[in-house]
């Protein structure tokens, strides 16, 4: 199924803000989530066990964390690439990848040699 019409602007905003590092995604047991006001959004991805088709799922939660609406986009759907980009970007931020890469880049620029020498090299 494509992204429901009433979620298109929300997905666009989440993707834009995620790509600019302005969403505090958190890892969960099965995916990632972000709290917005008194609600939240969850994303997860997987493969359908019957069709082997990839999907990205989206849920809207209330303030207690209860899912009040959910939907998914299959790999064959027109919006799959957009949702997959959001999921991948959000997952990277939830895992701290951009911050880690900035730290590594800074550490690399401050060192003449990278890596520890092997005992045979000393």
Image (spheres, rainbow, N blue to C red):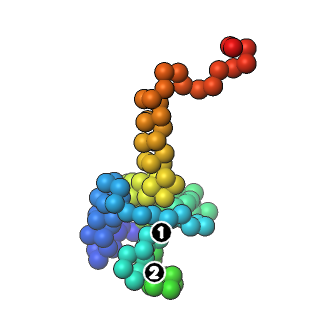
Residue on which disc 1 sits: 33
In the displayed image of the protein, which residue is found farthest to the top?
Answer: 121
State the image coordinates of residue 29 (x, y, percent, origin top left): 61, 67
Q: Residue at x 31, y 54 (%)?
A: 20
- Quadrant where the C terminus is found in the figure: top right
Q: Residue at x 33, y 64 (%)?
A: 14
State the image coordinates of residue 93 (x, y, percent, origin top left): 45, 55
Residue on which disc 2 sits: 61
State the image coordinates of residue 21 (x, y, percent, origin top left): 35, 55
Classify 97 as above or below 80.
above
Q: Residue at x 47, y 69 (%)?
A: 33
The answer to which of marks 1 and 2 sits earlier in the sequence is 1
Label 1 Cα neighbours within 10 Å, binned few <14 / some 14-19 / many ≥20: many
Determine which quarter of the picture holds residue 77: bottom left
In the displayed image of the protein, which residue is found farthest to the left?
Answer: 9
Q: Residue at x 54, y 63 (%)?
A: 27
Classify 43 as above or below 94.
below
Horizontal side of 116 relative to 110 (left or right) equals: right
- Nearest to the observer: residue 75 or residue 82: 82
Badge 1 vs badge 2, beta-carbon distance below 8 Å: yes
- Nearest to the observer: residue 22 or residue 92: 22
Q: Secondary structure at mark 2?
A: strand
State the image coordinates of residue 62 (x, y, percent, origin top left): 45, 85
Q: Secondary structure at mark 1?
A: strand
Mark pair 1, 2: CA separation? 10 Å
As drawn, the label of residue 43 is none
């Amino acid at each position: 199924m494509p992204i429901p019409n009433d979620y298109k602007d929300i997905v666009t905003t989440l993707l834009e803000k995620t790509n600019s590092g302005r969403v505090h995604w958190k890892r969960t047991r099965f995916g990632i989530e972000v709290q917005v006001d008194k609600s939240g959004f969850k994303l997860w991805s997987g493969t359908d066990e019957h069709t082997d088709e990839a999907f990205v799922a989206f849920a809207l939660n209330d303030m207690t964390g209860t899912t009040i609406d959910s939907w998914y986009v299959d790999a064959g759907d027109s919006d799959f690439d957009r949702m997959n980009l959001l999921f991948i970007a959000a997952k990277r931020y939830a895992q701290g990848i951009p911050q880690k890469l900035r730290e590594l880049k800074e550490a690399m620029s401050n060192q003449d040699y990278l890596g520890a020498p092997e005992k045979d090299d000393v």
